[in-house]
Image (cartoon, helix red, strand yellow):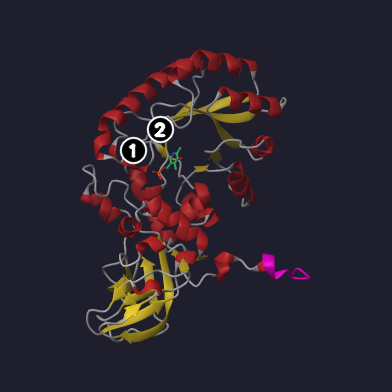
Amino acid sequence: MRENRNYTYCLDPQAQSPAKVEIDLPALAANYIYLKKQTSSMLMPVIKADAYGHGIVPVCRTLAGAGAEQFAVGTVEEGALLRETGFGGSLLALLGALAPEDVDLAIENRVTVIAGSAEQIRRIGARANGRDVLVALKFNTGMNRLGFVPGSLGSLFALLEENPCVKPVLAVSHLASADEDGGVQATLRQIEVFKDVVRAVKLRFPEIKISLYNSAGLLAYSKEFATDYVRPGLALYGANPLFGTKFNRPEIDAALKPVMRVKAPVVQVHPLLKGESISYGGTFTAPEDMQVAIVAAGYAQGYSRGMANKSEMSLNGKRCRVLGRICMQLVAVDTSNQPEAAEGDFAYILGGEGDNPVASHELAAWWGTIPYEVFCLLGSMNARNYPR
Ligand SMILES: *Cc1c(COP(=O)(O)O)cnc(C)c1O
């Protein structure tokens, strides 16, 4: 217990949130098992950014329990945290060493760091100062975000010779458009470029392992070229990256189980009479007598204000439309279809009871974003529970 509690710093916004996040760990394990069956490669689950808002420690534990032996984290610090919890397998930090101290932390915790530029190799080598650093060489095969270009292999090999502490254990690249209908040519091209890079790298480092596919790549393209590791993120959390694309298969929708649910309590239920408007600006006017429930969630909980008059929640198994503007911690929903709705009920922002839960892709569409952002924001801004 801290003495002289300073309330400015003691209010934990997550714990304070009226909205509650429930993480279904058995569903996460089931998704892992399903994805594992889709490939002969080893899975390297991606648990960066606090496991896409699901909580990195419980997610790592659950997946390790299901058989995962290596993980991709974001920062080296996330890797160090997992070491503290006792994880002994291999860890890859996708963001690499952002600060010189990250090199020390990576060495102390046996975390492999991504390196995708000559400057990064030099900085890692300089800081390592005689100690071995495990490195994943990142290649730019067409996404043009990070990585060595295929034409720079000669100078890369020379640089690695000058920096013998830098030990390449992995060669990776990342697909830009594996979940896009129009991305077939670009993706196949990336795969071809990566194949060529791998061939050349393996001549120099025969033991090096390779990794290319994200969730969409794993489900749509991984038969094109076998790699040692695949790196699924999104699909593990139960969102189908191929949903709404020509690559989708009903079997994937049926197999992947949503992992995150988000609910908030109803604080008041009352009539909204014909002609009355609701919330700031009165942007919704009742066309007839209605009943509304006021739910304790708003943009401070990550429930984006841009969804005013657009989104739906699930209350007692039934869909309710959001009415009017979304406030900081409150929002109104239409409960005319359920006169029995009452204070203390829970409205689901994501998920729900019954057979029509709010899917992450639906919420993302109302929001004007993708399920990734929905998970990251709702999961990091609200209190998380792990019901058994
Ligand atoms: C986030 C990330 C992944 C996982 O992508 P999903 O689409 O969530 O499966 C894989 N590789 C890299 C380099 C990433 O940054």
Label whose residue precedes the other's in the sequence (2 or 1):
2
Quarter occupied by residue 150: top left
Secondary structure beneath dot 2 equals: loop
Kind of residue at badge 2? Leu
Residue 348 visible, this orientation: yes
Asked if the residue under mark 1 is in contact with the one under mark 2, i.e. CB atoms within 8 Å, the reply is yes
Residue 388 visible, this orientation: no
Where the N terminus falls, by quadrant? bottom right
* Residue in view at x 49 percent, y 16 percent: 153
In this picture, which residue range is highlighted in magenta?
Answer: 1-9
Dot 1 surroundings within 10 Å: few (below 14), some, or many (20 or more)?
Answer: many
Is 8 a magenta residue? Answer: yes
Is 270 a magenta residue? Answer: no
Secondary structure beneath dot 1 equals: helix
Specify whether tag 1 is near ligand 1 (CB below 8 Å): yes
Q: How much space separates mark 2 and mark 1, taking CA atoms?
A: 8 Å
Kind of residue at badge 1? Gly
- Locate residue 243, reporting x and y percent: 27, 49
Of 340 and 278, which appears nearest the observer? 278
Q: Which mark is residue 312?
A: none
Of 345 and 204, which appears nearest the observer? 345
Question: Which residue is disc 1 drawn over?
Answer: 217
Q: Quadrant of ligand 1?
A: top left
Quarter occupied by residue 166: top right
Q: Main secondary structure of the magenta part?
A: loop
Question: Which residue is disc 2 drawn over?
Answer: 212
